[in-house]
Amino acid sequence: MLKNYPLSLFMLSDIEIAQQASLLPVQTIAEKTGISPEDLELYGKYKAKLPLHLIDSEKVQKAKLVLVSAISPTPAGEGKTTTSIGLSEALNRIGKKTIVALREPSLGPVFGIKGGATGGGYSQVVPMEDINLHFTGDISAVEKAHNLLAALIDNNLQNKIHSLGLDPRTILWKRVMDMNDRALRKITIGLGGTANGIPRETGFDITVASEVMAILCLSQNINELKERLSSILIGFTHQKKPVYVRDLKAAGAMAVLLKDAIRPNLVQTLEGNPAIIHGGPFANIAQGTNSILATKMAMSLGEYVVTESGFGFDLGAEKFLNIKCPVAGIAPHAIVIVATVRALKYHGGVTLQDLKTPNPEAIKKGSVNLQKHLENAKKYGVPTVVAINAFPADTWEEYAIIQEICASMGIKAIVSEVFAKGGQGGEELANEVVRLVEKEKSHYKPLYNWNDSVENKINTICKEIYGANEVQYTAQAEKDLQQIKELGYIHFPVCMAKTQYSFSDDPKKLGRPKDFEITIREIVIAAGAQFIIPIAGEIMRMPGLPNVPAAENMDIDDTGKITGLF
């Protein structure tokens, strides 16, 4: 077992470590990046909004972008955010002016099972409580803009004078709430008589699954935001004609609600380095990465930028590289794939209860998952390194097995101890990242051409990235394909929705499944976000709470000190 973990890690929770930190005023953090105090809109002492005029296209092209992804995760996650933060600390320690750019946490996971998204141990962004809770109100603004549209849709159904003739059975737009509440997945509204609207079936999604969130994170200015909002497809008339947000004249009001949310947020790491946190679309139903504006803001202010994508490389990184980068006109210079001993054991057949027991043979068996992700990374032509996120129960024998497997593929695997030691525990990883960036040229290229057929784009992802033999379409998916062609959306990129736990569409098929088919159940059109969403398997857009929600352990005392948040 590892012997060099600080004793404090076994005594302090993440929130206790964060609460013991001495935070710098956000103005001081801004000064480190060359931002004038006059350019800050303060949200208290330690948070601020940044104006979009700070984005400099020339500096964006000069900055070095590092993407952090991971292998297929266990239910608890493998530490991408912790690694991203720790790597940014380490890069600063070795003399590289670095900013980390991250997604905003959703309240659903915070109060559910996974917890917050501000890192862990001694690699965190702070103020941890604020970021994990309401932060600067961005997700709330997305929720309000989304639900304004929902209200306008139902109002138009009731309106006999200015009716658009919407067929209630075809309305695609649900309502959203930033909480896990399974009871709201399917509901009936408009009951109680004619004064209370038109009765129809609908439901709720979690806010971060909203197309408005995806749009916010792909838009690069207010005008583009309004254009994308205007293009949202909300349903069809009784004559089967498409109805868009522009037909309801709703985009302007929605953009008004998002006027502050479009600006990235500046906070800090535990070691007093700048962090930009903005946006948070689901990786299962959207692009799963922070906003283009946040990434470009960081690239305008730093020499190196570390950012992450949701879930494993097959989901989040694939979308980052095939959707976000082409839209933004940026490209990564290096990729870090996070692996853990426990996840490789899990993919090798070990139960969750036994992951702390040393098991070299399970590591070897489960390493096929890591190997497939590394093969996928090579297809994009970007230099790659593996970060082994260290846990106290790991052994050096297990690390050596992982390193040997990676070395056989020409990739270095480095033990990262950023959870236990902050930036100091990531210096070896940082030095390798710098070597990749400066010595090995990136030849980044998207995996497919957007102008290819929808079927070919789906086949490319399913066969090249997942390793499927064939792709099957249900009758509904075939119908959706025809509709996509009729509406003229065949040039949109593909934003695949499937389980994060497996390369297949079956979460129980761990490791590296062989000889499997992917079944596309339906294809959703996100006309405002400008991508299409093929759905494979059962995808939950409104999660539920676990039997013992994290919320049960949270409290606050009369001094305002929060406990139980993680």
Image (spheres, helix red, strand yellow):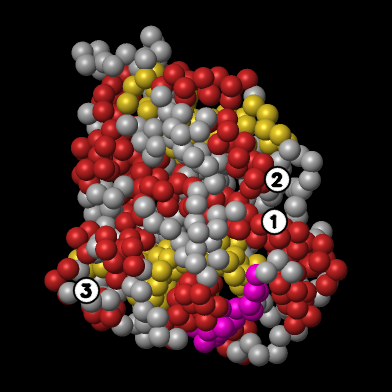
Look at 22% across and 59% down and name the residue there: 52
Q: CA distance from mark 3 to mark 2?
A: 46 Å
Mark closer to the chain start, 3 or 2 = 3
Determine the main secondary structure of the stretch shown in magenta. Answer: helix
Look at 14% across and 71% down and name the residue there: 38
Q: Mark 2 and mark 3 in contact (Cβ < 8 Å)?
A: no
Helix or strand or loop: what does disc 3 sit on? loop
Look at 45% across and 80% down and name the residue there: 91
Q: Give x and y (percent) for residue 196.
A: 33, 23
Q: Which numbered mark, 3 or 2, is in the foreground of this view? A: 2
User: For the residue carrying disc 1, how many other residues have a C-alpha within 10 Å: few (<14), some (14-19), or many (20+)?
Assistant: many
Helix or strand or loop: what does disc 1 sit on? helix
Q: Give x and y (percent) for residue 134.
A: 36, 60
Quadrant where the image shows the N terminus: bottom right
Residue 154 relative to residue 519: left or right: left
Residue 475 relative to residue 167: left or right: right
Q: Give x and y (percent) for residue 430.
A: 51, 79
Helix or strand or loop: what does disc 2 sit on? loop
Task: Say which amino acid is labelled 1.
Answer: Lys
Q: CA distance from mark 1 to mark 2?
A: 9 Å
Taking the image as drawn, is residue 177 in sight?
no
**Residue where numbered disc 1 is placed:** 372
Mark closer to the chain start, 1 or 3 = 3
Check residue 35 in the rendering and tell me which mark sits there, or answer none: 3
Region rendered in magenta: 411-429
Q: Which numbered mark, 1 or 3, is in the foreground of this view? A: 1
